[in-house]
Amino acid sequence: MAPPHPAHDVTEHVGYRLKRAAAALRGAMDKALRERGLTVPQYACLELLDERPGLSNAELARGTFVTRQSMNVVLRGLQEADLITRPATTDHGRALPAHLTEAGRERLHAARSAVYAIERTMVDAFPQRRLAALLADLDRMAEALGG
Amino acid sequence: MAPPHPAHDVTEHVGYRLKRAAAALRGAMDKALRERGLTVPQYACLELLDERPGLSNAELARGTFVTRQSMNVVLRGLQEADLITRPATTDHGRALPAHLTEAGRERLHAARSAVYAIERTMVDAFPQRRLAALLADLDRMAEALGG
DNA sequence: CTCCCCCTGTCAAAATCCTGACATGGAAGA
DNA sequence: TCTTCCATGTCAGGATTTTGACAGGGGGAG
């Protein structure tokens, strides 16, 4: 299907292309992760926790661009599946630090290879020398909008 | 499997940046459109119908990257608000062609200026000469993933 | 013509996500 | 000290979206 606009407005709709690419990625990840027993938000959460153990619910929510409430549901699911652990209380503050379990690490590593394959497919679709510029431009766009 | 490119944390991955940019855009559009009485899917639908009048529910769904069922809900909302019209039956086939009403056109034009301002903000955030390459790369990524 | 496949619209149910709200804990300032 | 403000976790409700399923219409192969 053709873009919603001829090349007349803001030099082609960036929003449309962004949405299209994001939708394609989301679809591919969803399919690959489903076969491995994870949802996309769950995977994002595990990946974030692997790199930065001890993150709280609110911090994970910000890191994955969802609300605290949504992340709360995700965390409960992961806890139910014994992929993460979270203390019931804490002696200082209110934030409850989450940590990966061994099963969580294993599940993450299995899913990661599938996700990396998808990412490689995406990256290989355009000249490799443009990657850095692409990442930088995406970042600047998000920052310009207050992301 | 090795990572698709050197990266020491998840923020270096294309998927993360893509999600971040898409989330920022979605948030900005959501806020601007809400003040003008439209949701993001509704706006996308109106924009598509303005360029290609007579599109069916399924075609609109594909054009906005949602399911037929979701678009069906959107169309009902737009119909309820008298922003589009749809025949109850058709003499040939099963697809019901949708058309903008005059009110729909007016609402769209009002919303469009706000959305264009957002896109302009995004585009101005990076060197203008990179725009064409960015659009092309986003398109290739989507294509590579079967979008 | 008939069978088969694909596309379409739609219903129902579930999953997911968000908005609004509230109570708690900590930090900074009067 | 205490008071105000911010951030956090959580509950409830609703809005949105998806999955699964069904029936109808069209077109091509046999």
Image (cartoon, coloured by chain):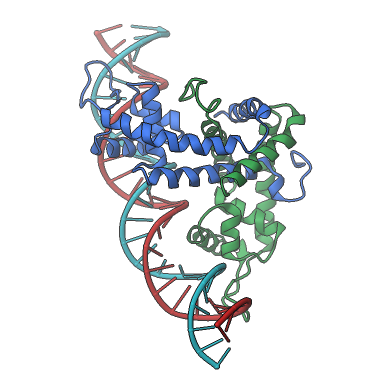
Chain colours: A green, B blue, C red, D cyan
Residue at the image point whose x is 42% and y is 40% from the top: B40
**Whether residue A28 can be seen here:** no
Query: Residue C30 placed where, x, y %?
Result: 55, 82
- Residue at the far right: name it: B6
Residue at the image point whose x is 61% and y is 51% from the top: A44
Residue at the image point whose x is 56% and y is 25% from the top: A11
Query: Residue A25 placed where, x, y %?
Result: 58, 37
Q: Nearer the viewer, residue B147 or B114?
A: B114
Say how many tags the image has. Answer: 0
Q: Nearer the viewer, residue A51 or B100?
A: B100
Q: Nearer the viewer, residue B69 or A58?
A: A58
Query: Residue D29 placed where, x, y %?
Result: 42, 8
Q: Quadrant of residue D13?
A: bottom left
**Whether residue A6 can be seen here:** yes
- Above or below: residue D30 compared with residue A28: above
- Above or below: residue B89 compared with residue A77: above
Q: Is residue A120 left or right of residue C18?
A: right
Q: Quadrant of residue D11?
A: bottom left
Q: Quadrant of residue B134?
A: top right
Query: Residue A70 placed where, x, y %?
Result: 49, 57
